[in-house]
């Protein structure tokens, strides 16, 4: 029941926001997201750390075909639900100083997005998952395409067509698997419950096809090299709240999909193709990092860094080791926190200087002790310094990939070095050095900005110092998953 | 069957209502007639299936569902004809009567049990359409479209009639059950006449639903006809046509599936490719919708090619989703173009007509967006489930997955041109100033959009 509420409350708050006036929309949205966060915390506290699915709900949807409106939360879902519930209020709060035209529609779309994301992470029925997976695209498309930068129309359009195209392959795979399932009774010949899909057991060749159908869908979403071409442009052109949603949460839909569908449904396909998938992911890590080093636009730089980081998460998941998967889970949270923080810092810099060009900035530190500290914390988390959240995730991920293949693990390890290069270069050029005409009157953080950055900074250290508070929740579910893979 | 009788009587009544001075009563009267026919359609819901008029017509829950879709679309489209009687030269009574008669034809096509009835139904519907296409009498393009439609349509009907004659020659009967019996008992010695006859009948029918390569009339006719009749054509004719093809193939020729499936598969692929690719290059919204209607014919044919137990449900749902979305789209176009044609005489039916609509009238913009998303098959709209069920039938058939790959590629192409409309609506700047929408339009658009979203959330509402 709680799970259903997690999906419904954002929908209801979105409708409430739609009917409020533009100038009070953000407050209403804020209340809605905080309420959702409270609910998620309640779920978090009462969650039993075992492999079962909890807080489930199930209603007939297309009952005669065995398609149910069903959801629930297990360890893997829980982390992502928490991430979504935690980040959305901060994303809403981050917009408080920035007026957006048609604000009520703007915030309603953010809330609809949250509802769809909650649906994706909790769906227990394959078609329900697909529905939310696609539905999440609509609000984010409009957010990016209506409120975005100059090139927004072309860029977001490419994004939309690209992702829908990939998802359609997944739809075919799901429909195909659905027809292979055993039904619940004589009158209901098939079932689309995700657990029913797990039991299908196809032969190796068919699993290879299933693997690729899913892989294309999720690889575009994450994105994995060479399916990433939509990503840097879309991140750069979108308004910052949409970029935060995209990079902080939506990208995790792809990783989550791999965990939920690809690993348990096509283990033989994984056996045949996981090396290919990891090689592509590792190529993405190196490629993304090298391009990030050369960027001048700081938003674009973080976009490429995000592409590199997700490559490592994907590699960890495809390694099918406990460390790799656990690392990917913790890194999803860590990356969500860091990247939202970084994009917010960029937005702060941009809103005061009207520039994102690294060459035109500089000397910001002199007037802004607070911003400097927060920026540094988030940045160190991002480059995986020990004691920060990024370290835990990357360490586990790299050890997982290393377990799978030493050479790939070594190349993937470059991410730490290259990450430090582009991030520290960003910090050095933008924050240190002499003042430019743009940064002369740079004001330090306002109250609402601090209110966004403080929780993020706390989380950076919390996960960095005591990751076990999250890892212990996911471990039973991950073990259960890996058992299905290595049966 | 009551609905056929009622509609025929109502048609004559409406014709005579035209003698009254006040033309204002015609629209409500016609709407009432369609509503009554809609209710009458379900009279035999519980004692279906049944045969009527000496086994000429057949009725079961499937045919009733198809008739219901046709009548619902007709109701919505007719409601959009508000303001139609204002034109001095128009003869609204005749048009409303013709609309009612054409529905008789459509319902006959849906429920025929005898090939003669199929022919009669097709002719009644087509002749009505020729007249309605040319109803904008002073518009050269409307006249051209009507003549073109008539010439091509007459040809197609002729071919179909020839096919029916050949089928009669082979089997000695016009009755679907008898033909089925012939196919079943002589499975090793089926006369060649039957094969040729079937193909000719199929060609005639595929012409009516504008499948490639029999689609060349579609863009010109859709473009030339008054928009409200374009909406009528692209919903009612298509639904009735597909119901008829399904009835023909499943009723009599399932035994020779191996003969016709490949022909149908080839036409399906061609239709999908031609419809979608050509739609991309259109500047005029109406022409785009014409090609999009061709592509939707392709998706429906996909399901007919599969011909599994789920096919009828899939076609019903798809037709409904498609009809609702199409009515909304044309409704918005009419509302926008009305305003525009008053101000200037330039072509008001290009994509540019929608520029800035998001600011001018948020309701219209929302309706148009939902309708485009539904046509593109994006989740949370009825169109998604339509595609879902259609794809499901193909997967169930098993060996036709390759067709599905083509269909998916083409769906991605489809997103391109539907989104051109959405982009124009929200992201391009156009004229400013609020756009006023007559209340009748508003009700129709709200109803069709609500249904689209409702079926998108709860597809099981049907059946």
Image (cartoon, rainbow, N blue to C red):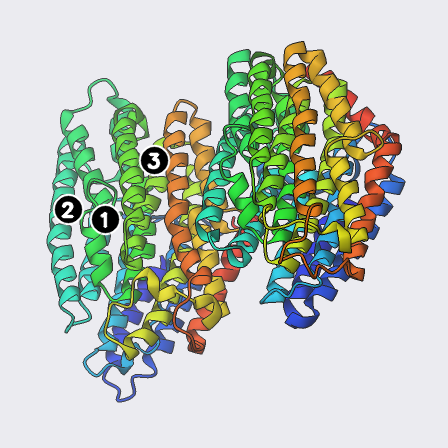
| CA–CA distance in space, label 2 to label 1 | 8 Å
Chain of the residue under label 2: B
Residue indicated by mark 2: B156
Residue A312, which numbered label? none
Please provide percent x and percent y for residue B259.
Answer: 26, 25
Q: Which of marks 3 and 2 is in front?
A: 2
Q: Where is residue A261, by image quadrant?
A: top right
Please provide percent x and percent y for residue A435.
Answer: 67, 53
**Does A49 appear above or below A375?**
above
Residue indicated by mark 3: B250
The answer to whether mark 2 and mark 1 are in CB contact below 8 A is yes
Please provide percent x and percent y for residue A272.
Answer: 56, 12
**Does A256 appear above or below B148?**
above
Chain of the residue under label 1: B
The answer to whether mark 1 and mark 3 are in CB contact below 8 A is no
Residue indicated by mark 1: B208
Chain of the residue under label 3: B
| CA–CA distance in space, label 3 to label 2 | 22 Å
First in residue order: circle 2 vs circle 1 = 2
Quadrant (top left/top right/bottom left/bottom right) for the C terminus of chain A: top right
């Amino acid at each position: 029941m709680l799970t259903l509420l997690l999906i419904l409350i954002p929908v209801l708050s979105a409708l409430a926001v739609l009917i409020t006036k533009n100038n009070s929309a953000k407050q209403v949205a804020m209340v809605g997201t905080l309420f959702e966060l409270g609910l998620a915390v309640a779920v978090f506290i009462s969650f039993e750390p075992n492999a079962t699915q909890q807080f489930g709900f199930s209603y007939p949807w297309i009952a005669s075909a065995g398609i149910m409106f069903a959801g629930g939360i297990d360890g893997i879902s829980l982390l992502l639900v928490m991430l979504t519930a935690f980040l959305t209020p901060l994303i809403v709060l981050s917009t408080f100083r920035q007026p957006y035209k048609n604000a009520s529609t703007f915030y309603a779309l953010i809330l609809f997005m949250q509802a769809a994301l909650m649906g994706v992470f909790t769906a227990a029925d394959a078609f329900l998952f697909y529905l939310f997976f696609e539905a999440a695209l609509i609000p984010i498309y409009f957010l990016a395409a209506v409120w975005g930068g100059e090139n927004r129309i072309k860029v977001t359009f490419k994004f939309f067509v690209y992702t829908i195209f990939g998802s359609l392959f997944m739809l075919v795979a799901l429909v195909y698997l659905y027809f292979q399932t055993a039904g619940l009774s004589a009158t209901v010949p098939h079932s689309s419950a995700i657990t029913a899909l797990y039991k299908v057991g196809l032969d190796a060749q068919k699993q290879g096809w299933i693997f690729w159908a899913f892989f294309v869908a999720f690889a575009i979403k994450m994105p994995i090299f060479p399916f990433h071409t939509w990503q840097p442009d879309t991140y750069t052109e979108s308004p910052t709240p949409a970029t935060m949603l995209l990079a902080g949460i939506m990208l995790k839909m792809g990783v989550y999909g791999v965990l939920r569908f690809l690993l348990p449904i096509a283990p033989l396909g994984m056996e045949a193709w996981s090396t290919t998938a990891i090689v592509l992911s590792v190529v993405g890590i190196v490629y993304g990092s090298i391009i990030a080093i050369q960027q001048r636009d700081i938003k674009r730089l973080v976009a490429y860094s995000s592409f590199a980081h997700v490559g490592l998460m994907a590699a960890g998941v495809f390694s099918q080791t406990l460390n790799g998967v656990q690392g990917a889970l913790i890194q999803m949270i860590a990356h969500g926190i860091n990247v939202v923080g970084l994009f917010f810092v960029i937005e702060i810099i941009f809103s005061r200087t009207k520039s994102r060009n690294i060459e035109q900035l500089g000397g910001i530190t002199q007037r802004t002790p607070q911003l400097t500290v927060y920026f540094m914390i988030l940045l160190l988390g991002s480059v995986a310094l020990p004691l920060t959240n990024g370290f835990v995730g990357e360490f586990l991920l790299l050890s997982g990939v290393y377990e799978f293949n030493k050479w790939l693990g070594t190349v993937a390890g470059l991410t730490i070095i290259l990450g430090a290069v582009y991030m520290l270069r960003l910090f050095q050029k933008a924050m240190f050095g002499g003042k430019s005409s743009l940064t002369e009157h740079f004001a330090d953080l306002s109250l609402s900005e601090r209110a966004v950055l403080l929780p993020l900074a706390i989380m950076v250290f919390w996960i960095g110092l005591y990751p076990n508070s999250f890892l212990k929740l996911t471990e039973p579910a991950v073990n259960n998953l890996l058992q299905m893979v290595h049966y | 069957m009551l609905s056929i009788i009622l509609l025929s009587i109502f048609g004559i009544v409406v014709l005579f209502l035209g003698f009254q001075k006040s033309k204002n009563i015609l629209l409500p009267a016609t709407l009432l007639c369609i509503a009554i026919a809609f209710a009458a359609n379900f009279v035999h819901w519980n004692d279906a299936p049944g045969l009527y008029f000496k086994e000429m017509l057949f009725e079961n829950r499937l045919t009733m569902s198809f008739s219901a879709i046709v009548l619902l679309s007709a109701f919505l489209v007719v409601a959009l004809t508000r303001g139609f009687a204002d034109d001095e030269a128009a003869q609204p009574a005749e048009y409303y009567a013709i609309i009612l008669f054409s529905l008789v034809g459509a319902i006959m096509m849906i429920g025929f049990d005898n090939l003669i009835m199929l022919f009669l139904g097709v002719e009644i519907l087509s002749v009505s359409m020729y007249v309605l296409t040319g109803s904008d009498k002073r518009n050269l393009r409307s006249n051209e479209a009507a003549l073109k439609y008539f010439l091509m349509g007459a040809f197609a009907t002729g071919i179909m009639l020839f096919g029916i004659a050949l089928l009669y020659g082979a089997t000695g009967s016009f009755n679907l059950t008898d033909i089925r019996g012939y196919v079943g008992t002589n499975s090793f010695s089926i006369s060649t006449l039957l094969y040729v006859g079937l193909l000719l009948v199929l060609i005639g029918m595929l012409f009516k639903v504008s499948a490639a390569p029999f689609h060349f009339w579609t863009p010109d006719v859709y473009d030339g006809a008054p928009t409200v009749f374009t909406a009528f054509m692209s919903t009612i004719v298509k639904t009735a046509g597909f119901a008829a093809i399904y009835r023909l193939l499943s009723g009599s020729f399932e035994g020779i599936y191996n003969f016709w499936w490949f022909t149908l598969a080839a036409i399906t692929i061609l239709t999908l490719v031609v419809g979608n690719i050509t739609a991309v290059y259109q500047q005029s919204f109406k022409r785009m919708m014409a090609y999009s209607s061709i592509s939707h014919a392709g998706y429906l044919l996909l399901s007919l090619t599969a011909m599994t137990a789920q096919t009828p449900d899939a076609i019903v749902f798809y037709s409904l989703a498609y009809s609702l979305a199409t009515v909304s789209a044309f409704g918005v176009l009419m509302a926008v173009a009305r305003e525009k044609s008053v101000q200037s005489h330039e072509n008001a039916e290009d994509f540019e007509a929608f520029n800035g609509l998001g600011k001018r009238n948020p309701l219209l913009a929302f309706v148009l967006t939902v309708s485009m998303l539904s046509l593109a098959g994006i989740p949370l709209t009825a169109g998604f489930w339509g595609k879902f069920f259609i794809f499901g039938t193909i997967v169930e058939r098993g060996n036709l997955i390759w067709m599905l790959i083509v269909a998916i590629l083409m769906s991605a192409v489809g997103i391109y041109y539907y989104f051109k409309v959405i982009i124009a609506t929200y992201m391009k700047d156009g004229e400013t100033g609020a756009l006023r929408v007559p209340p009748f339009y508003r009700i129709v658009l709200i109803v069709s959009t609500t249904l689209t979203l409702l079926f998108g959330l709860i597809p099981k509402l049907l059946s």
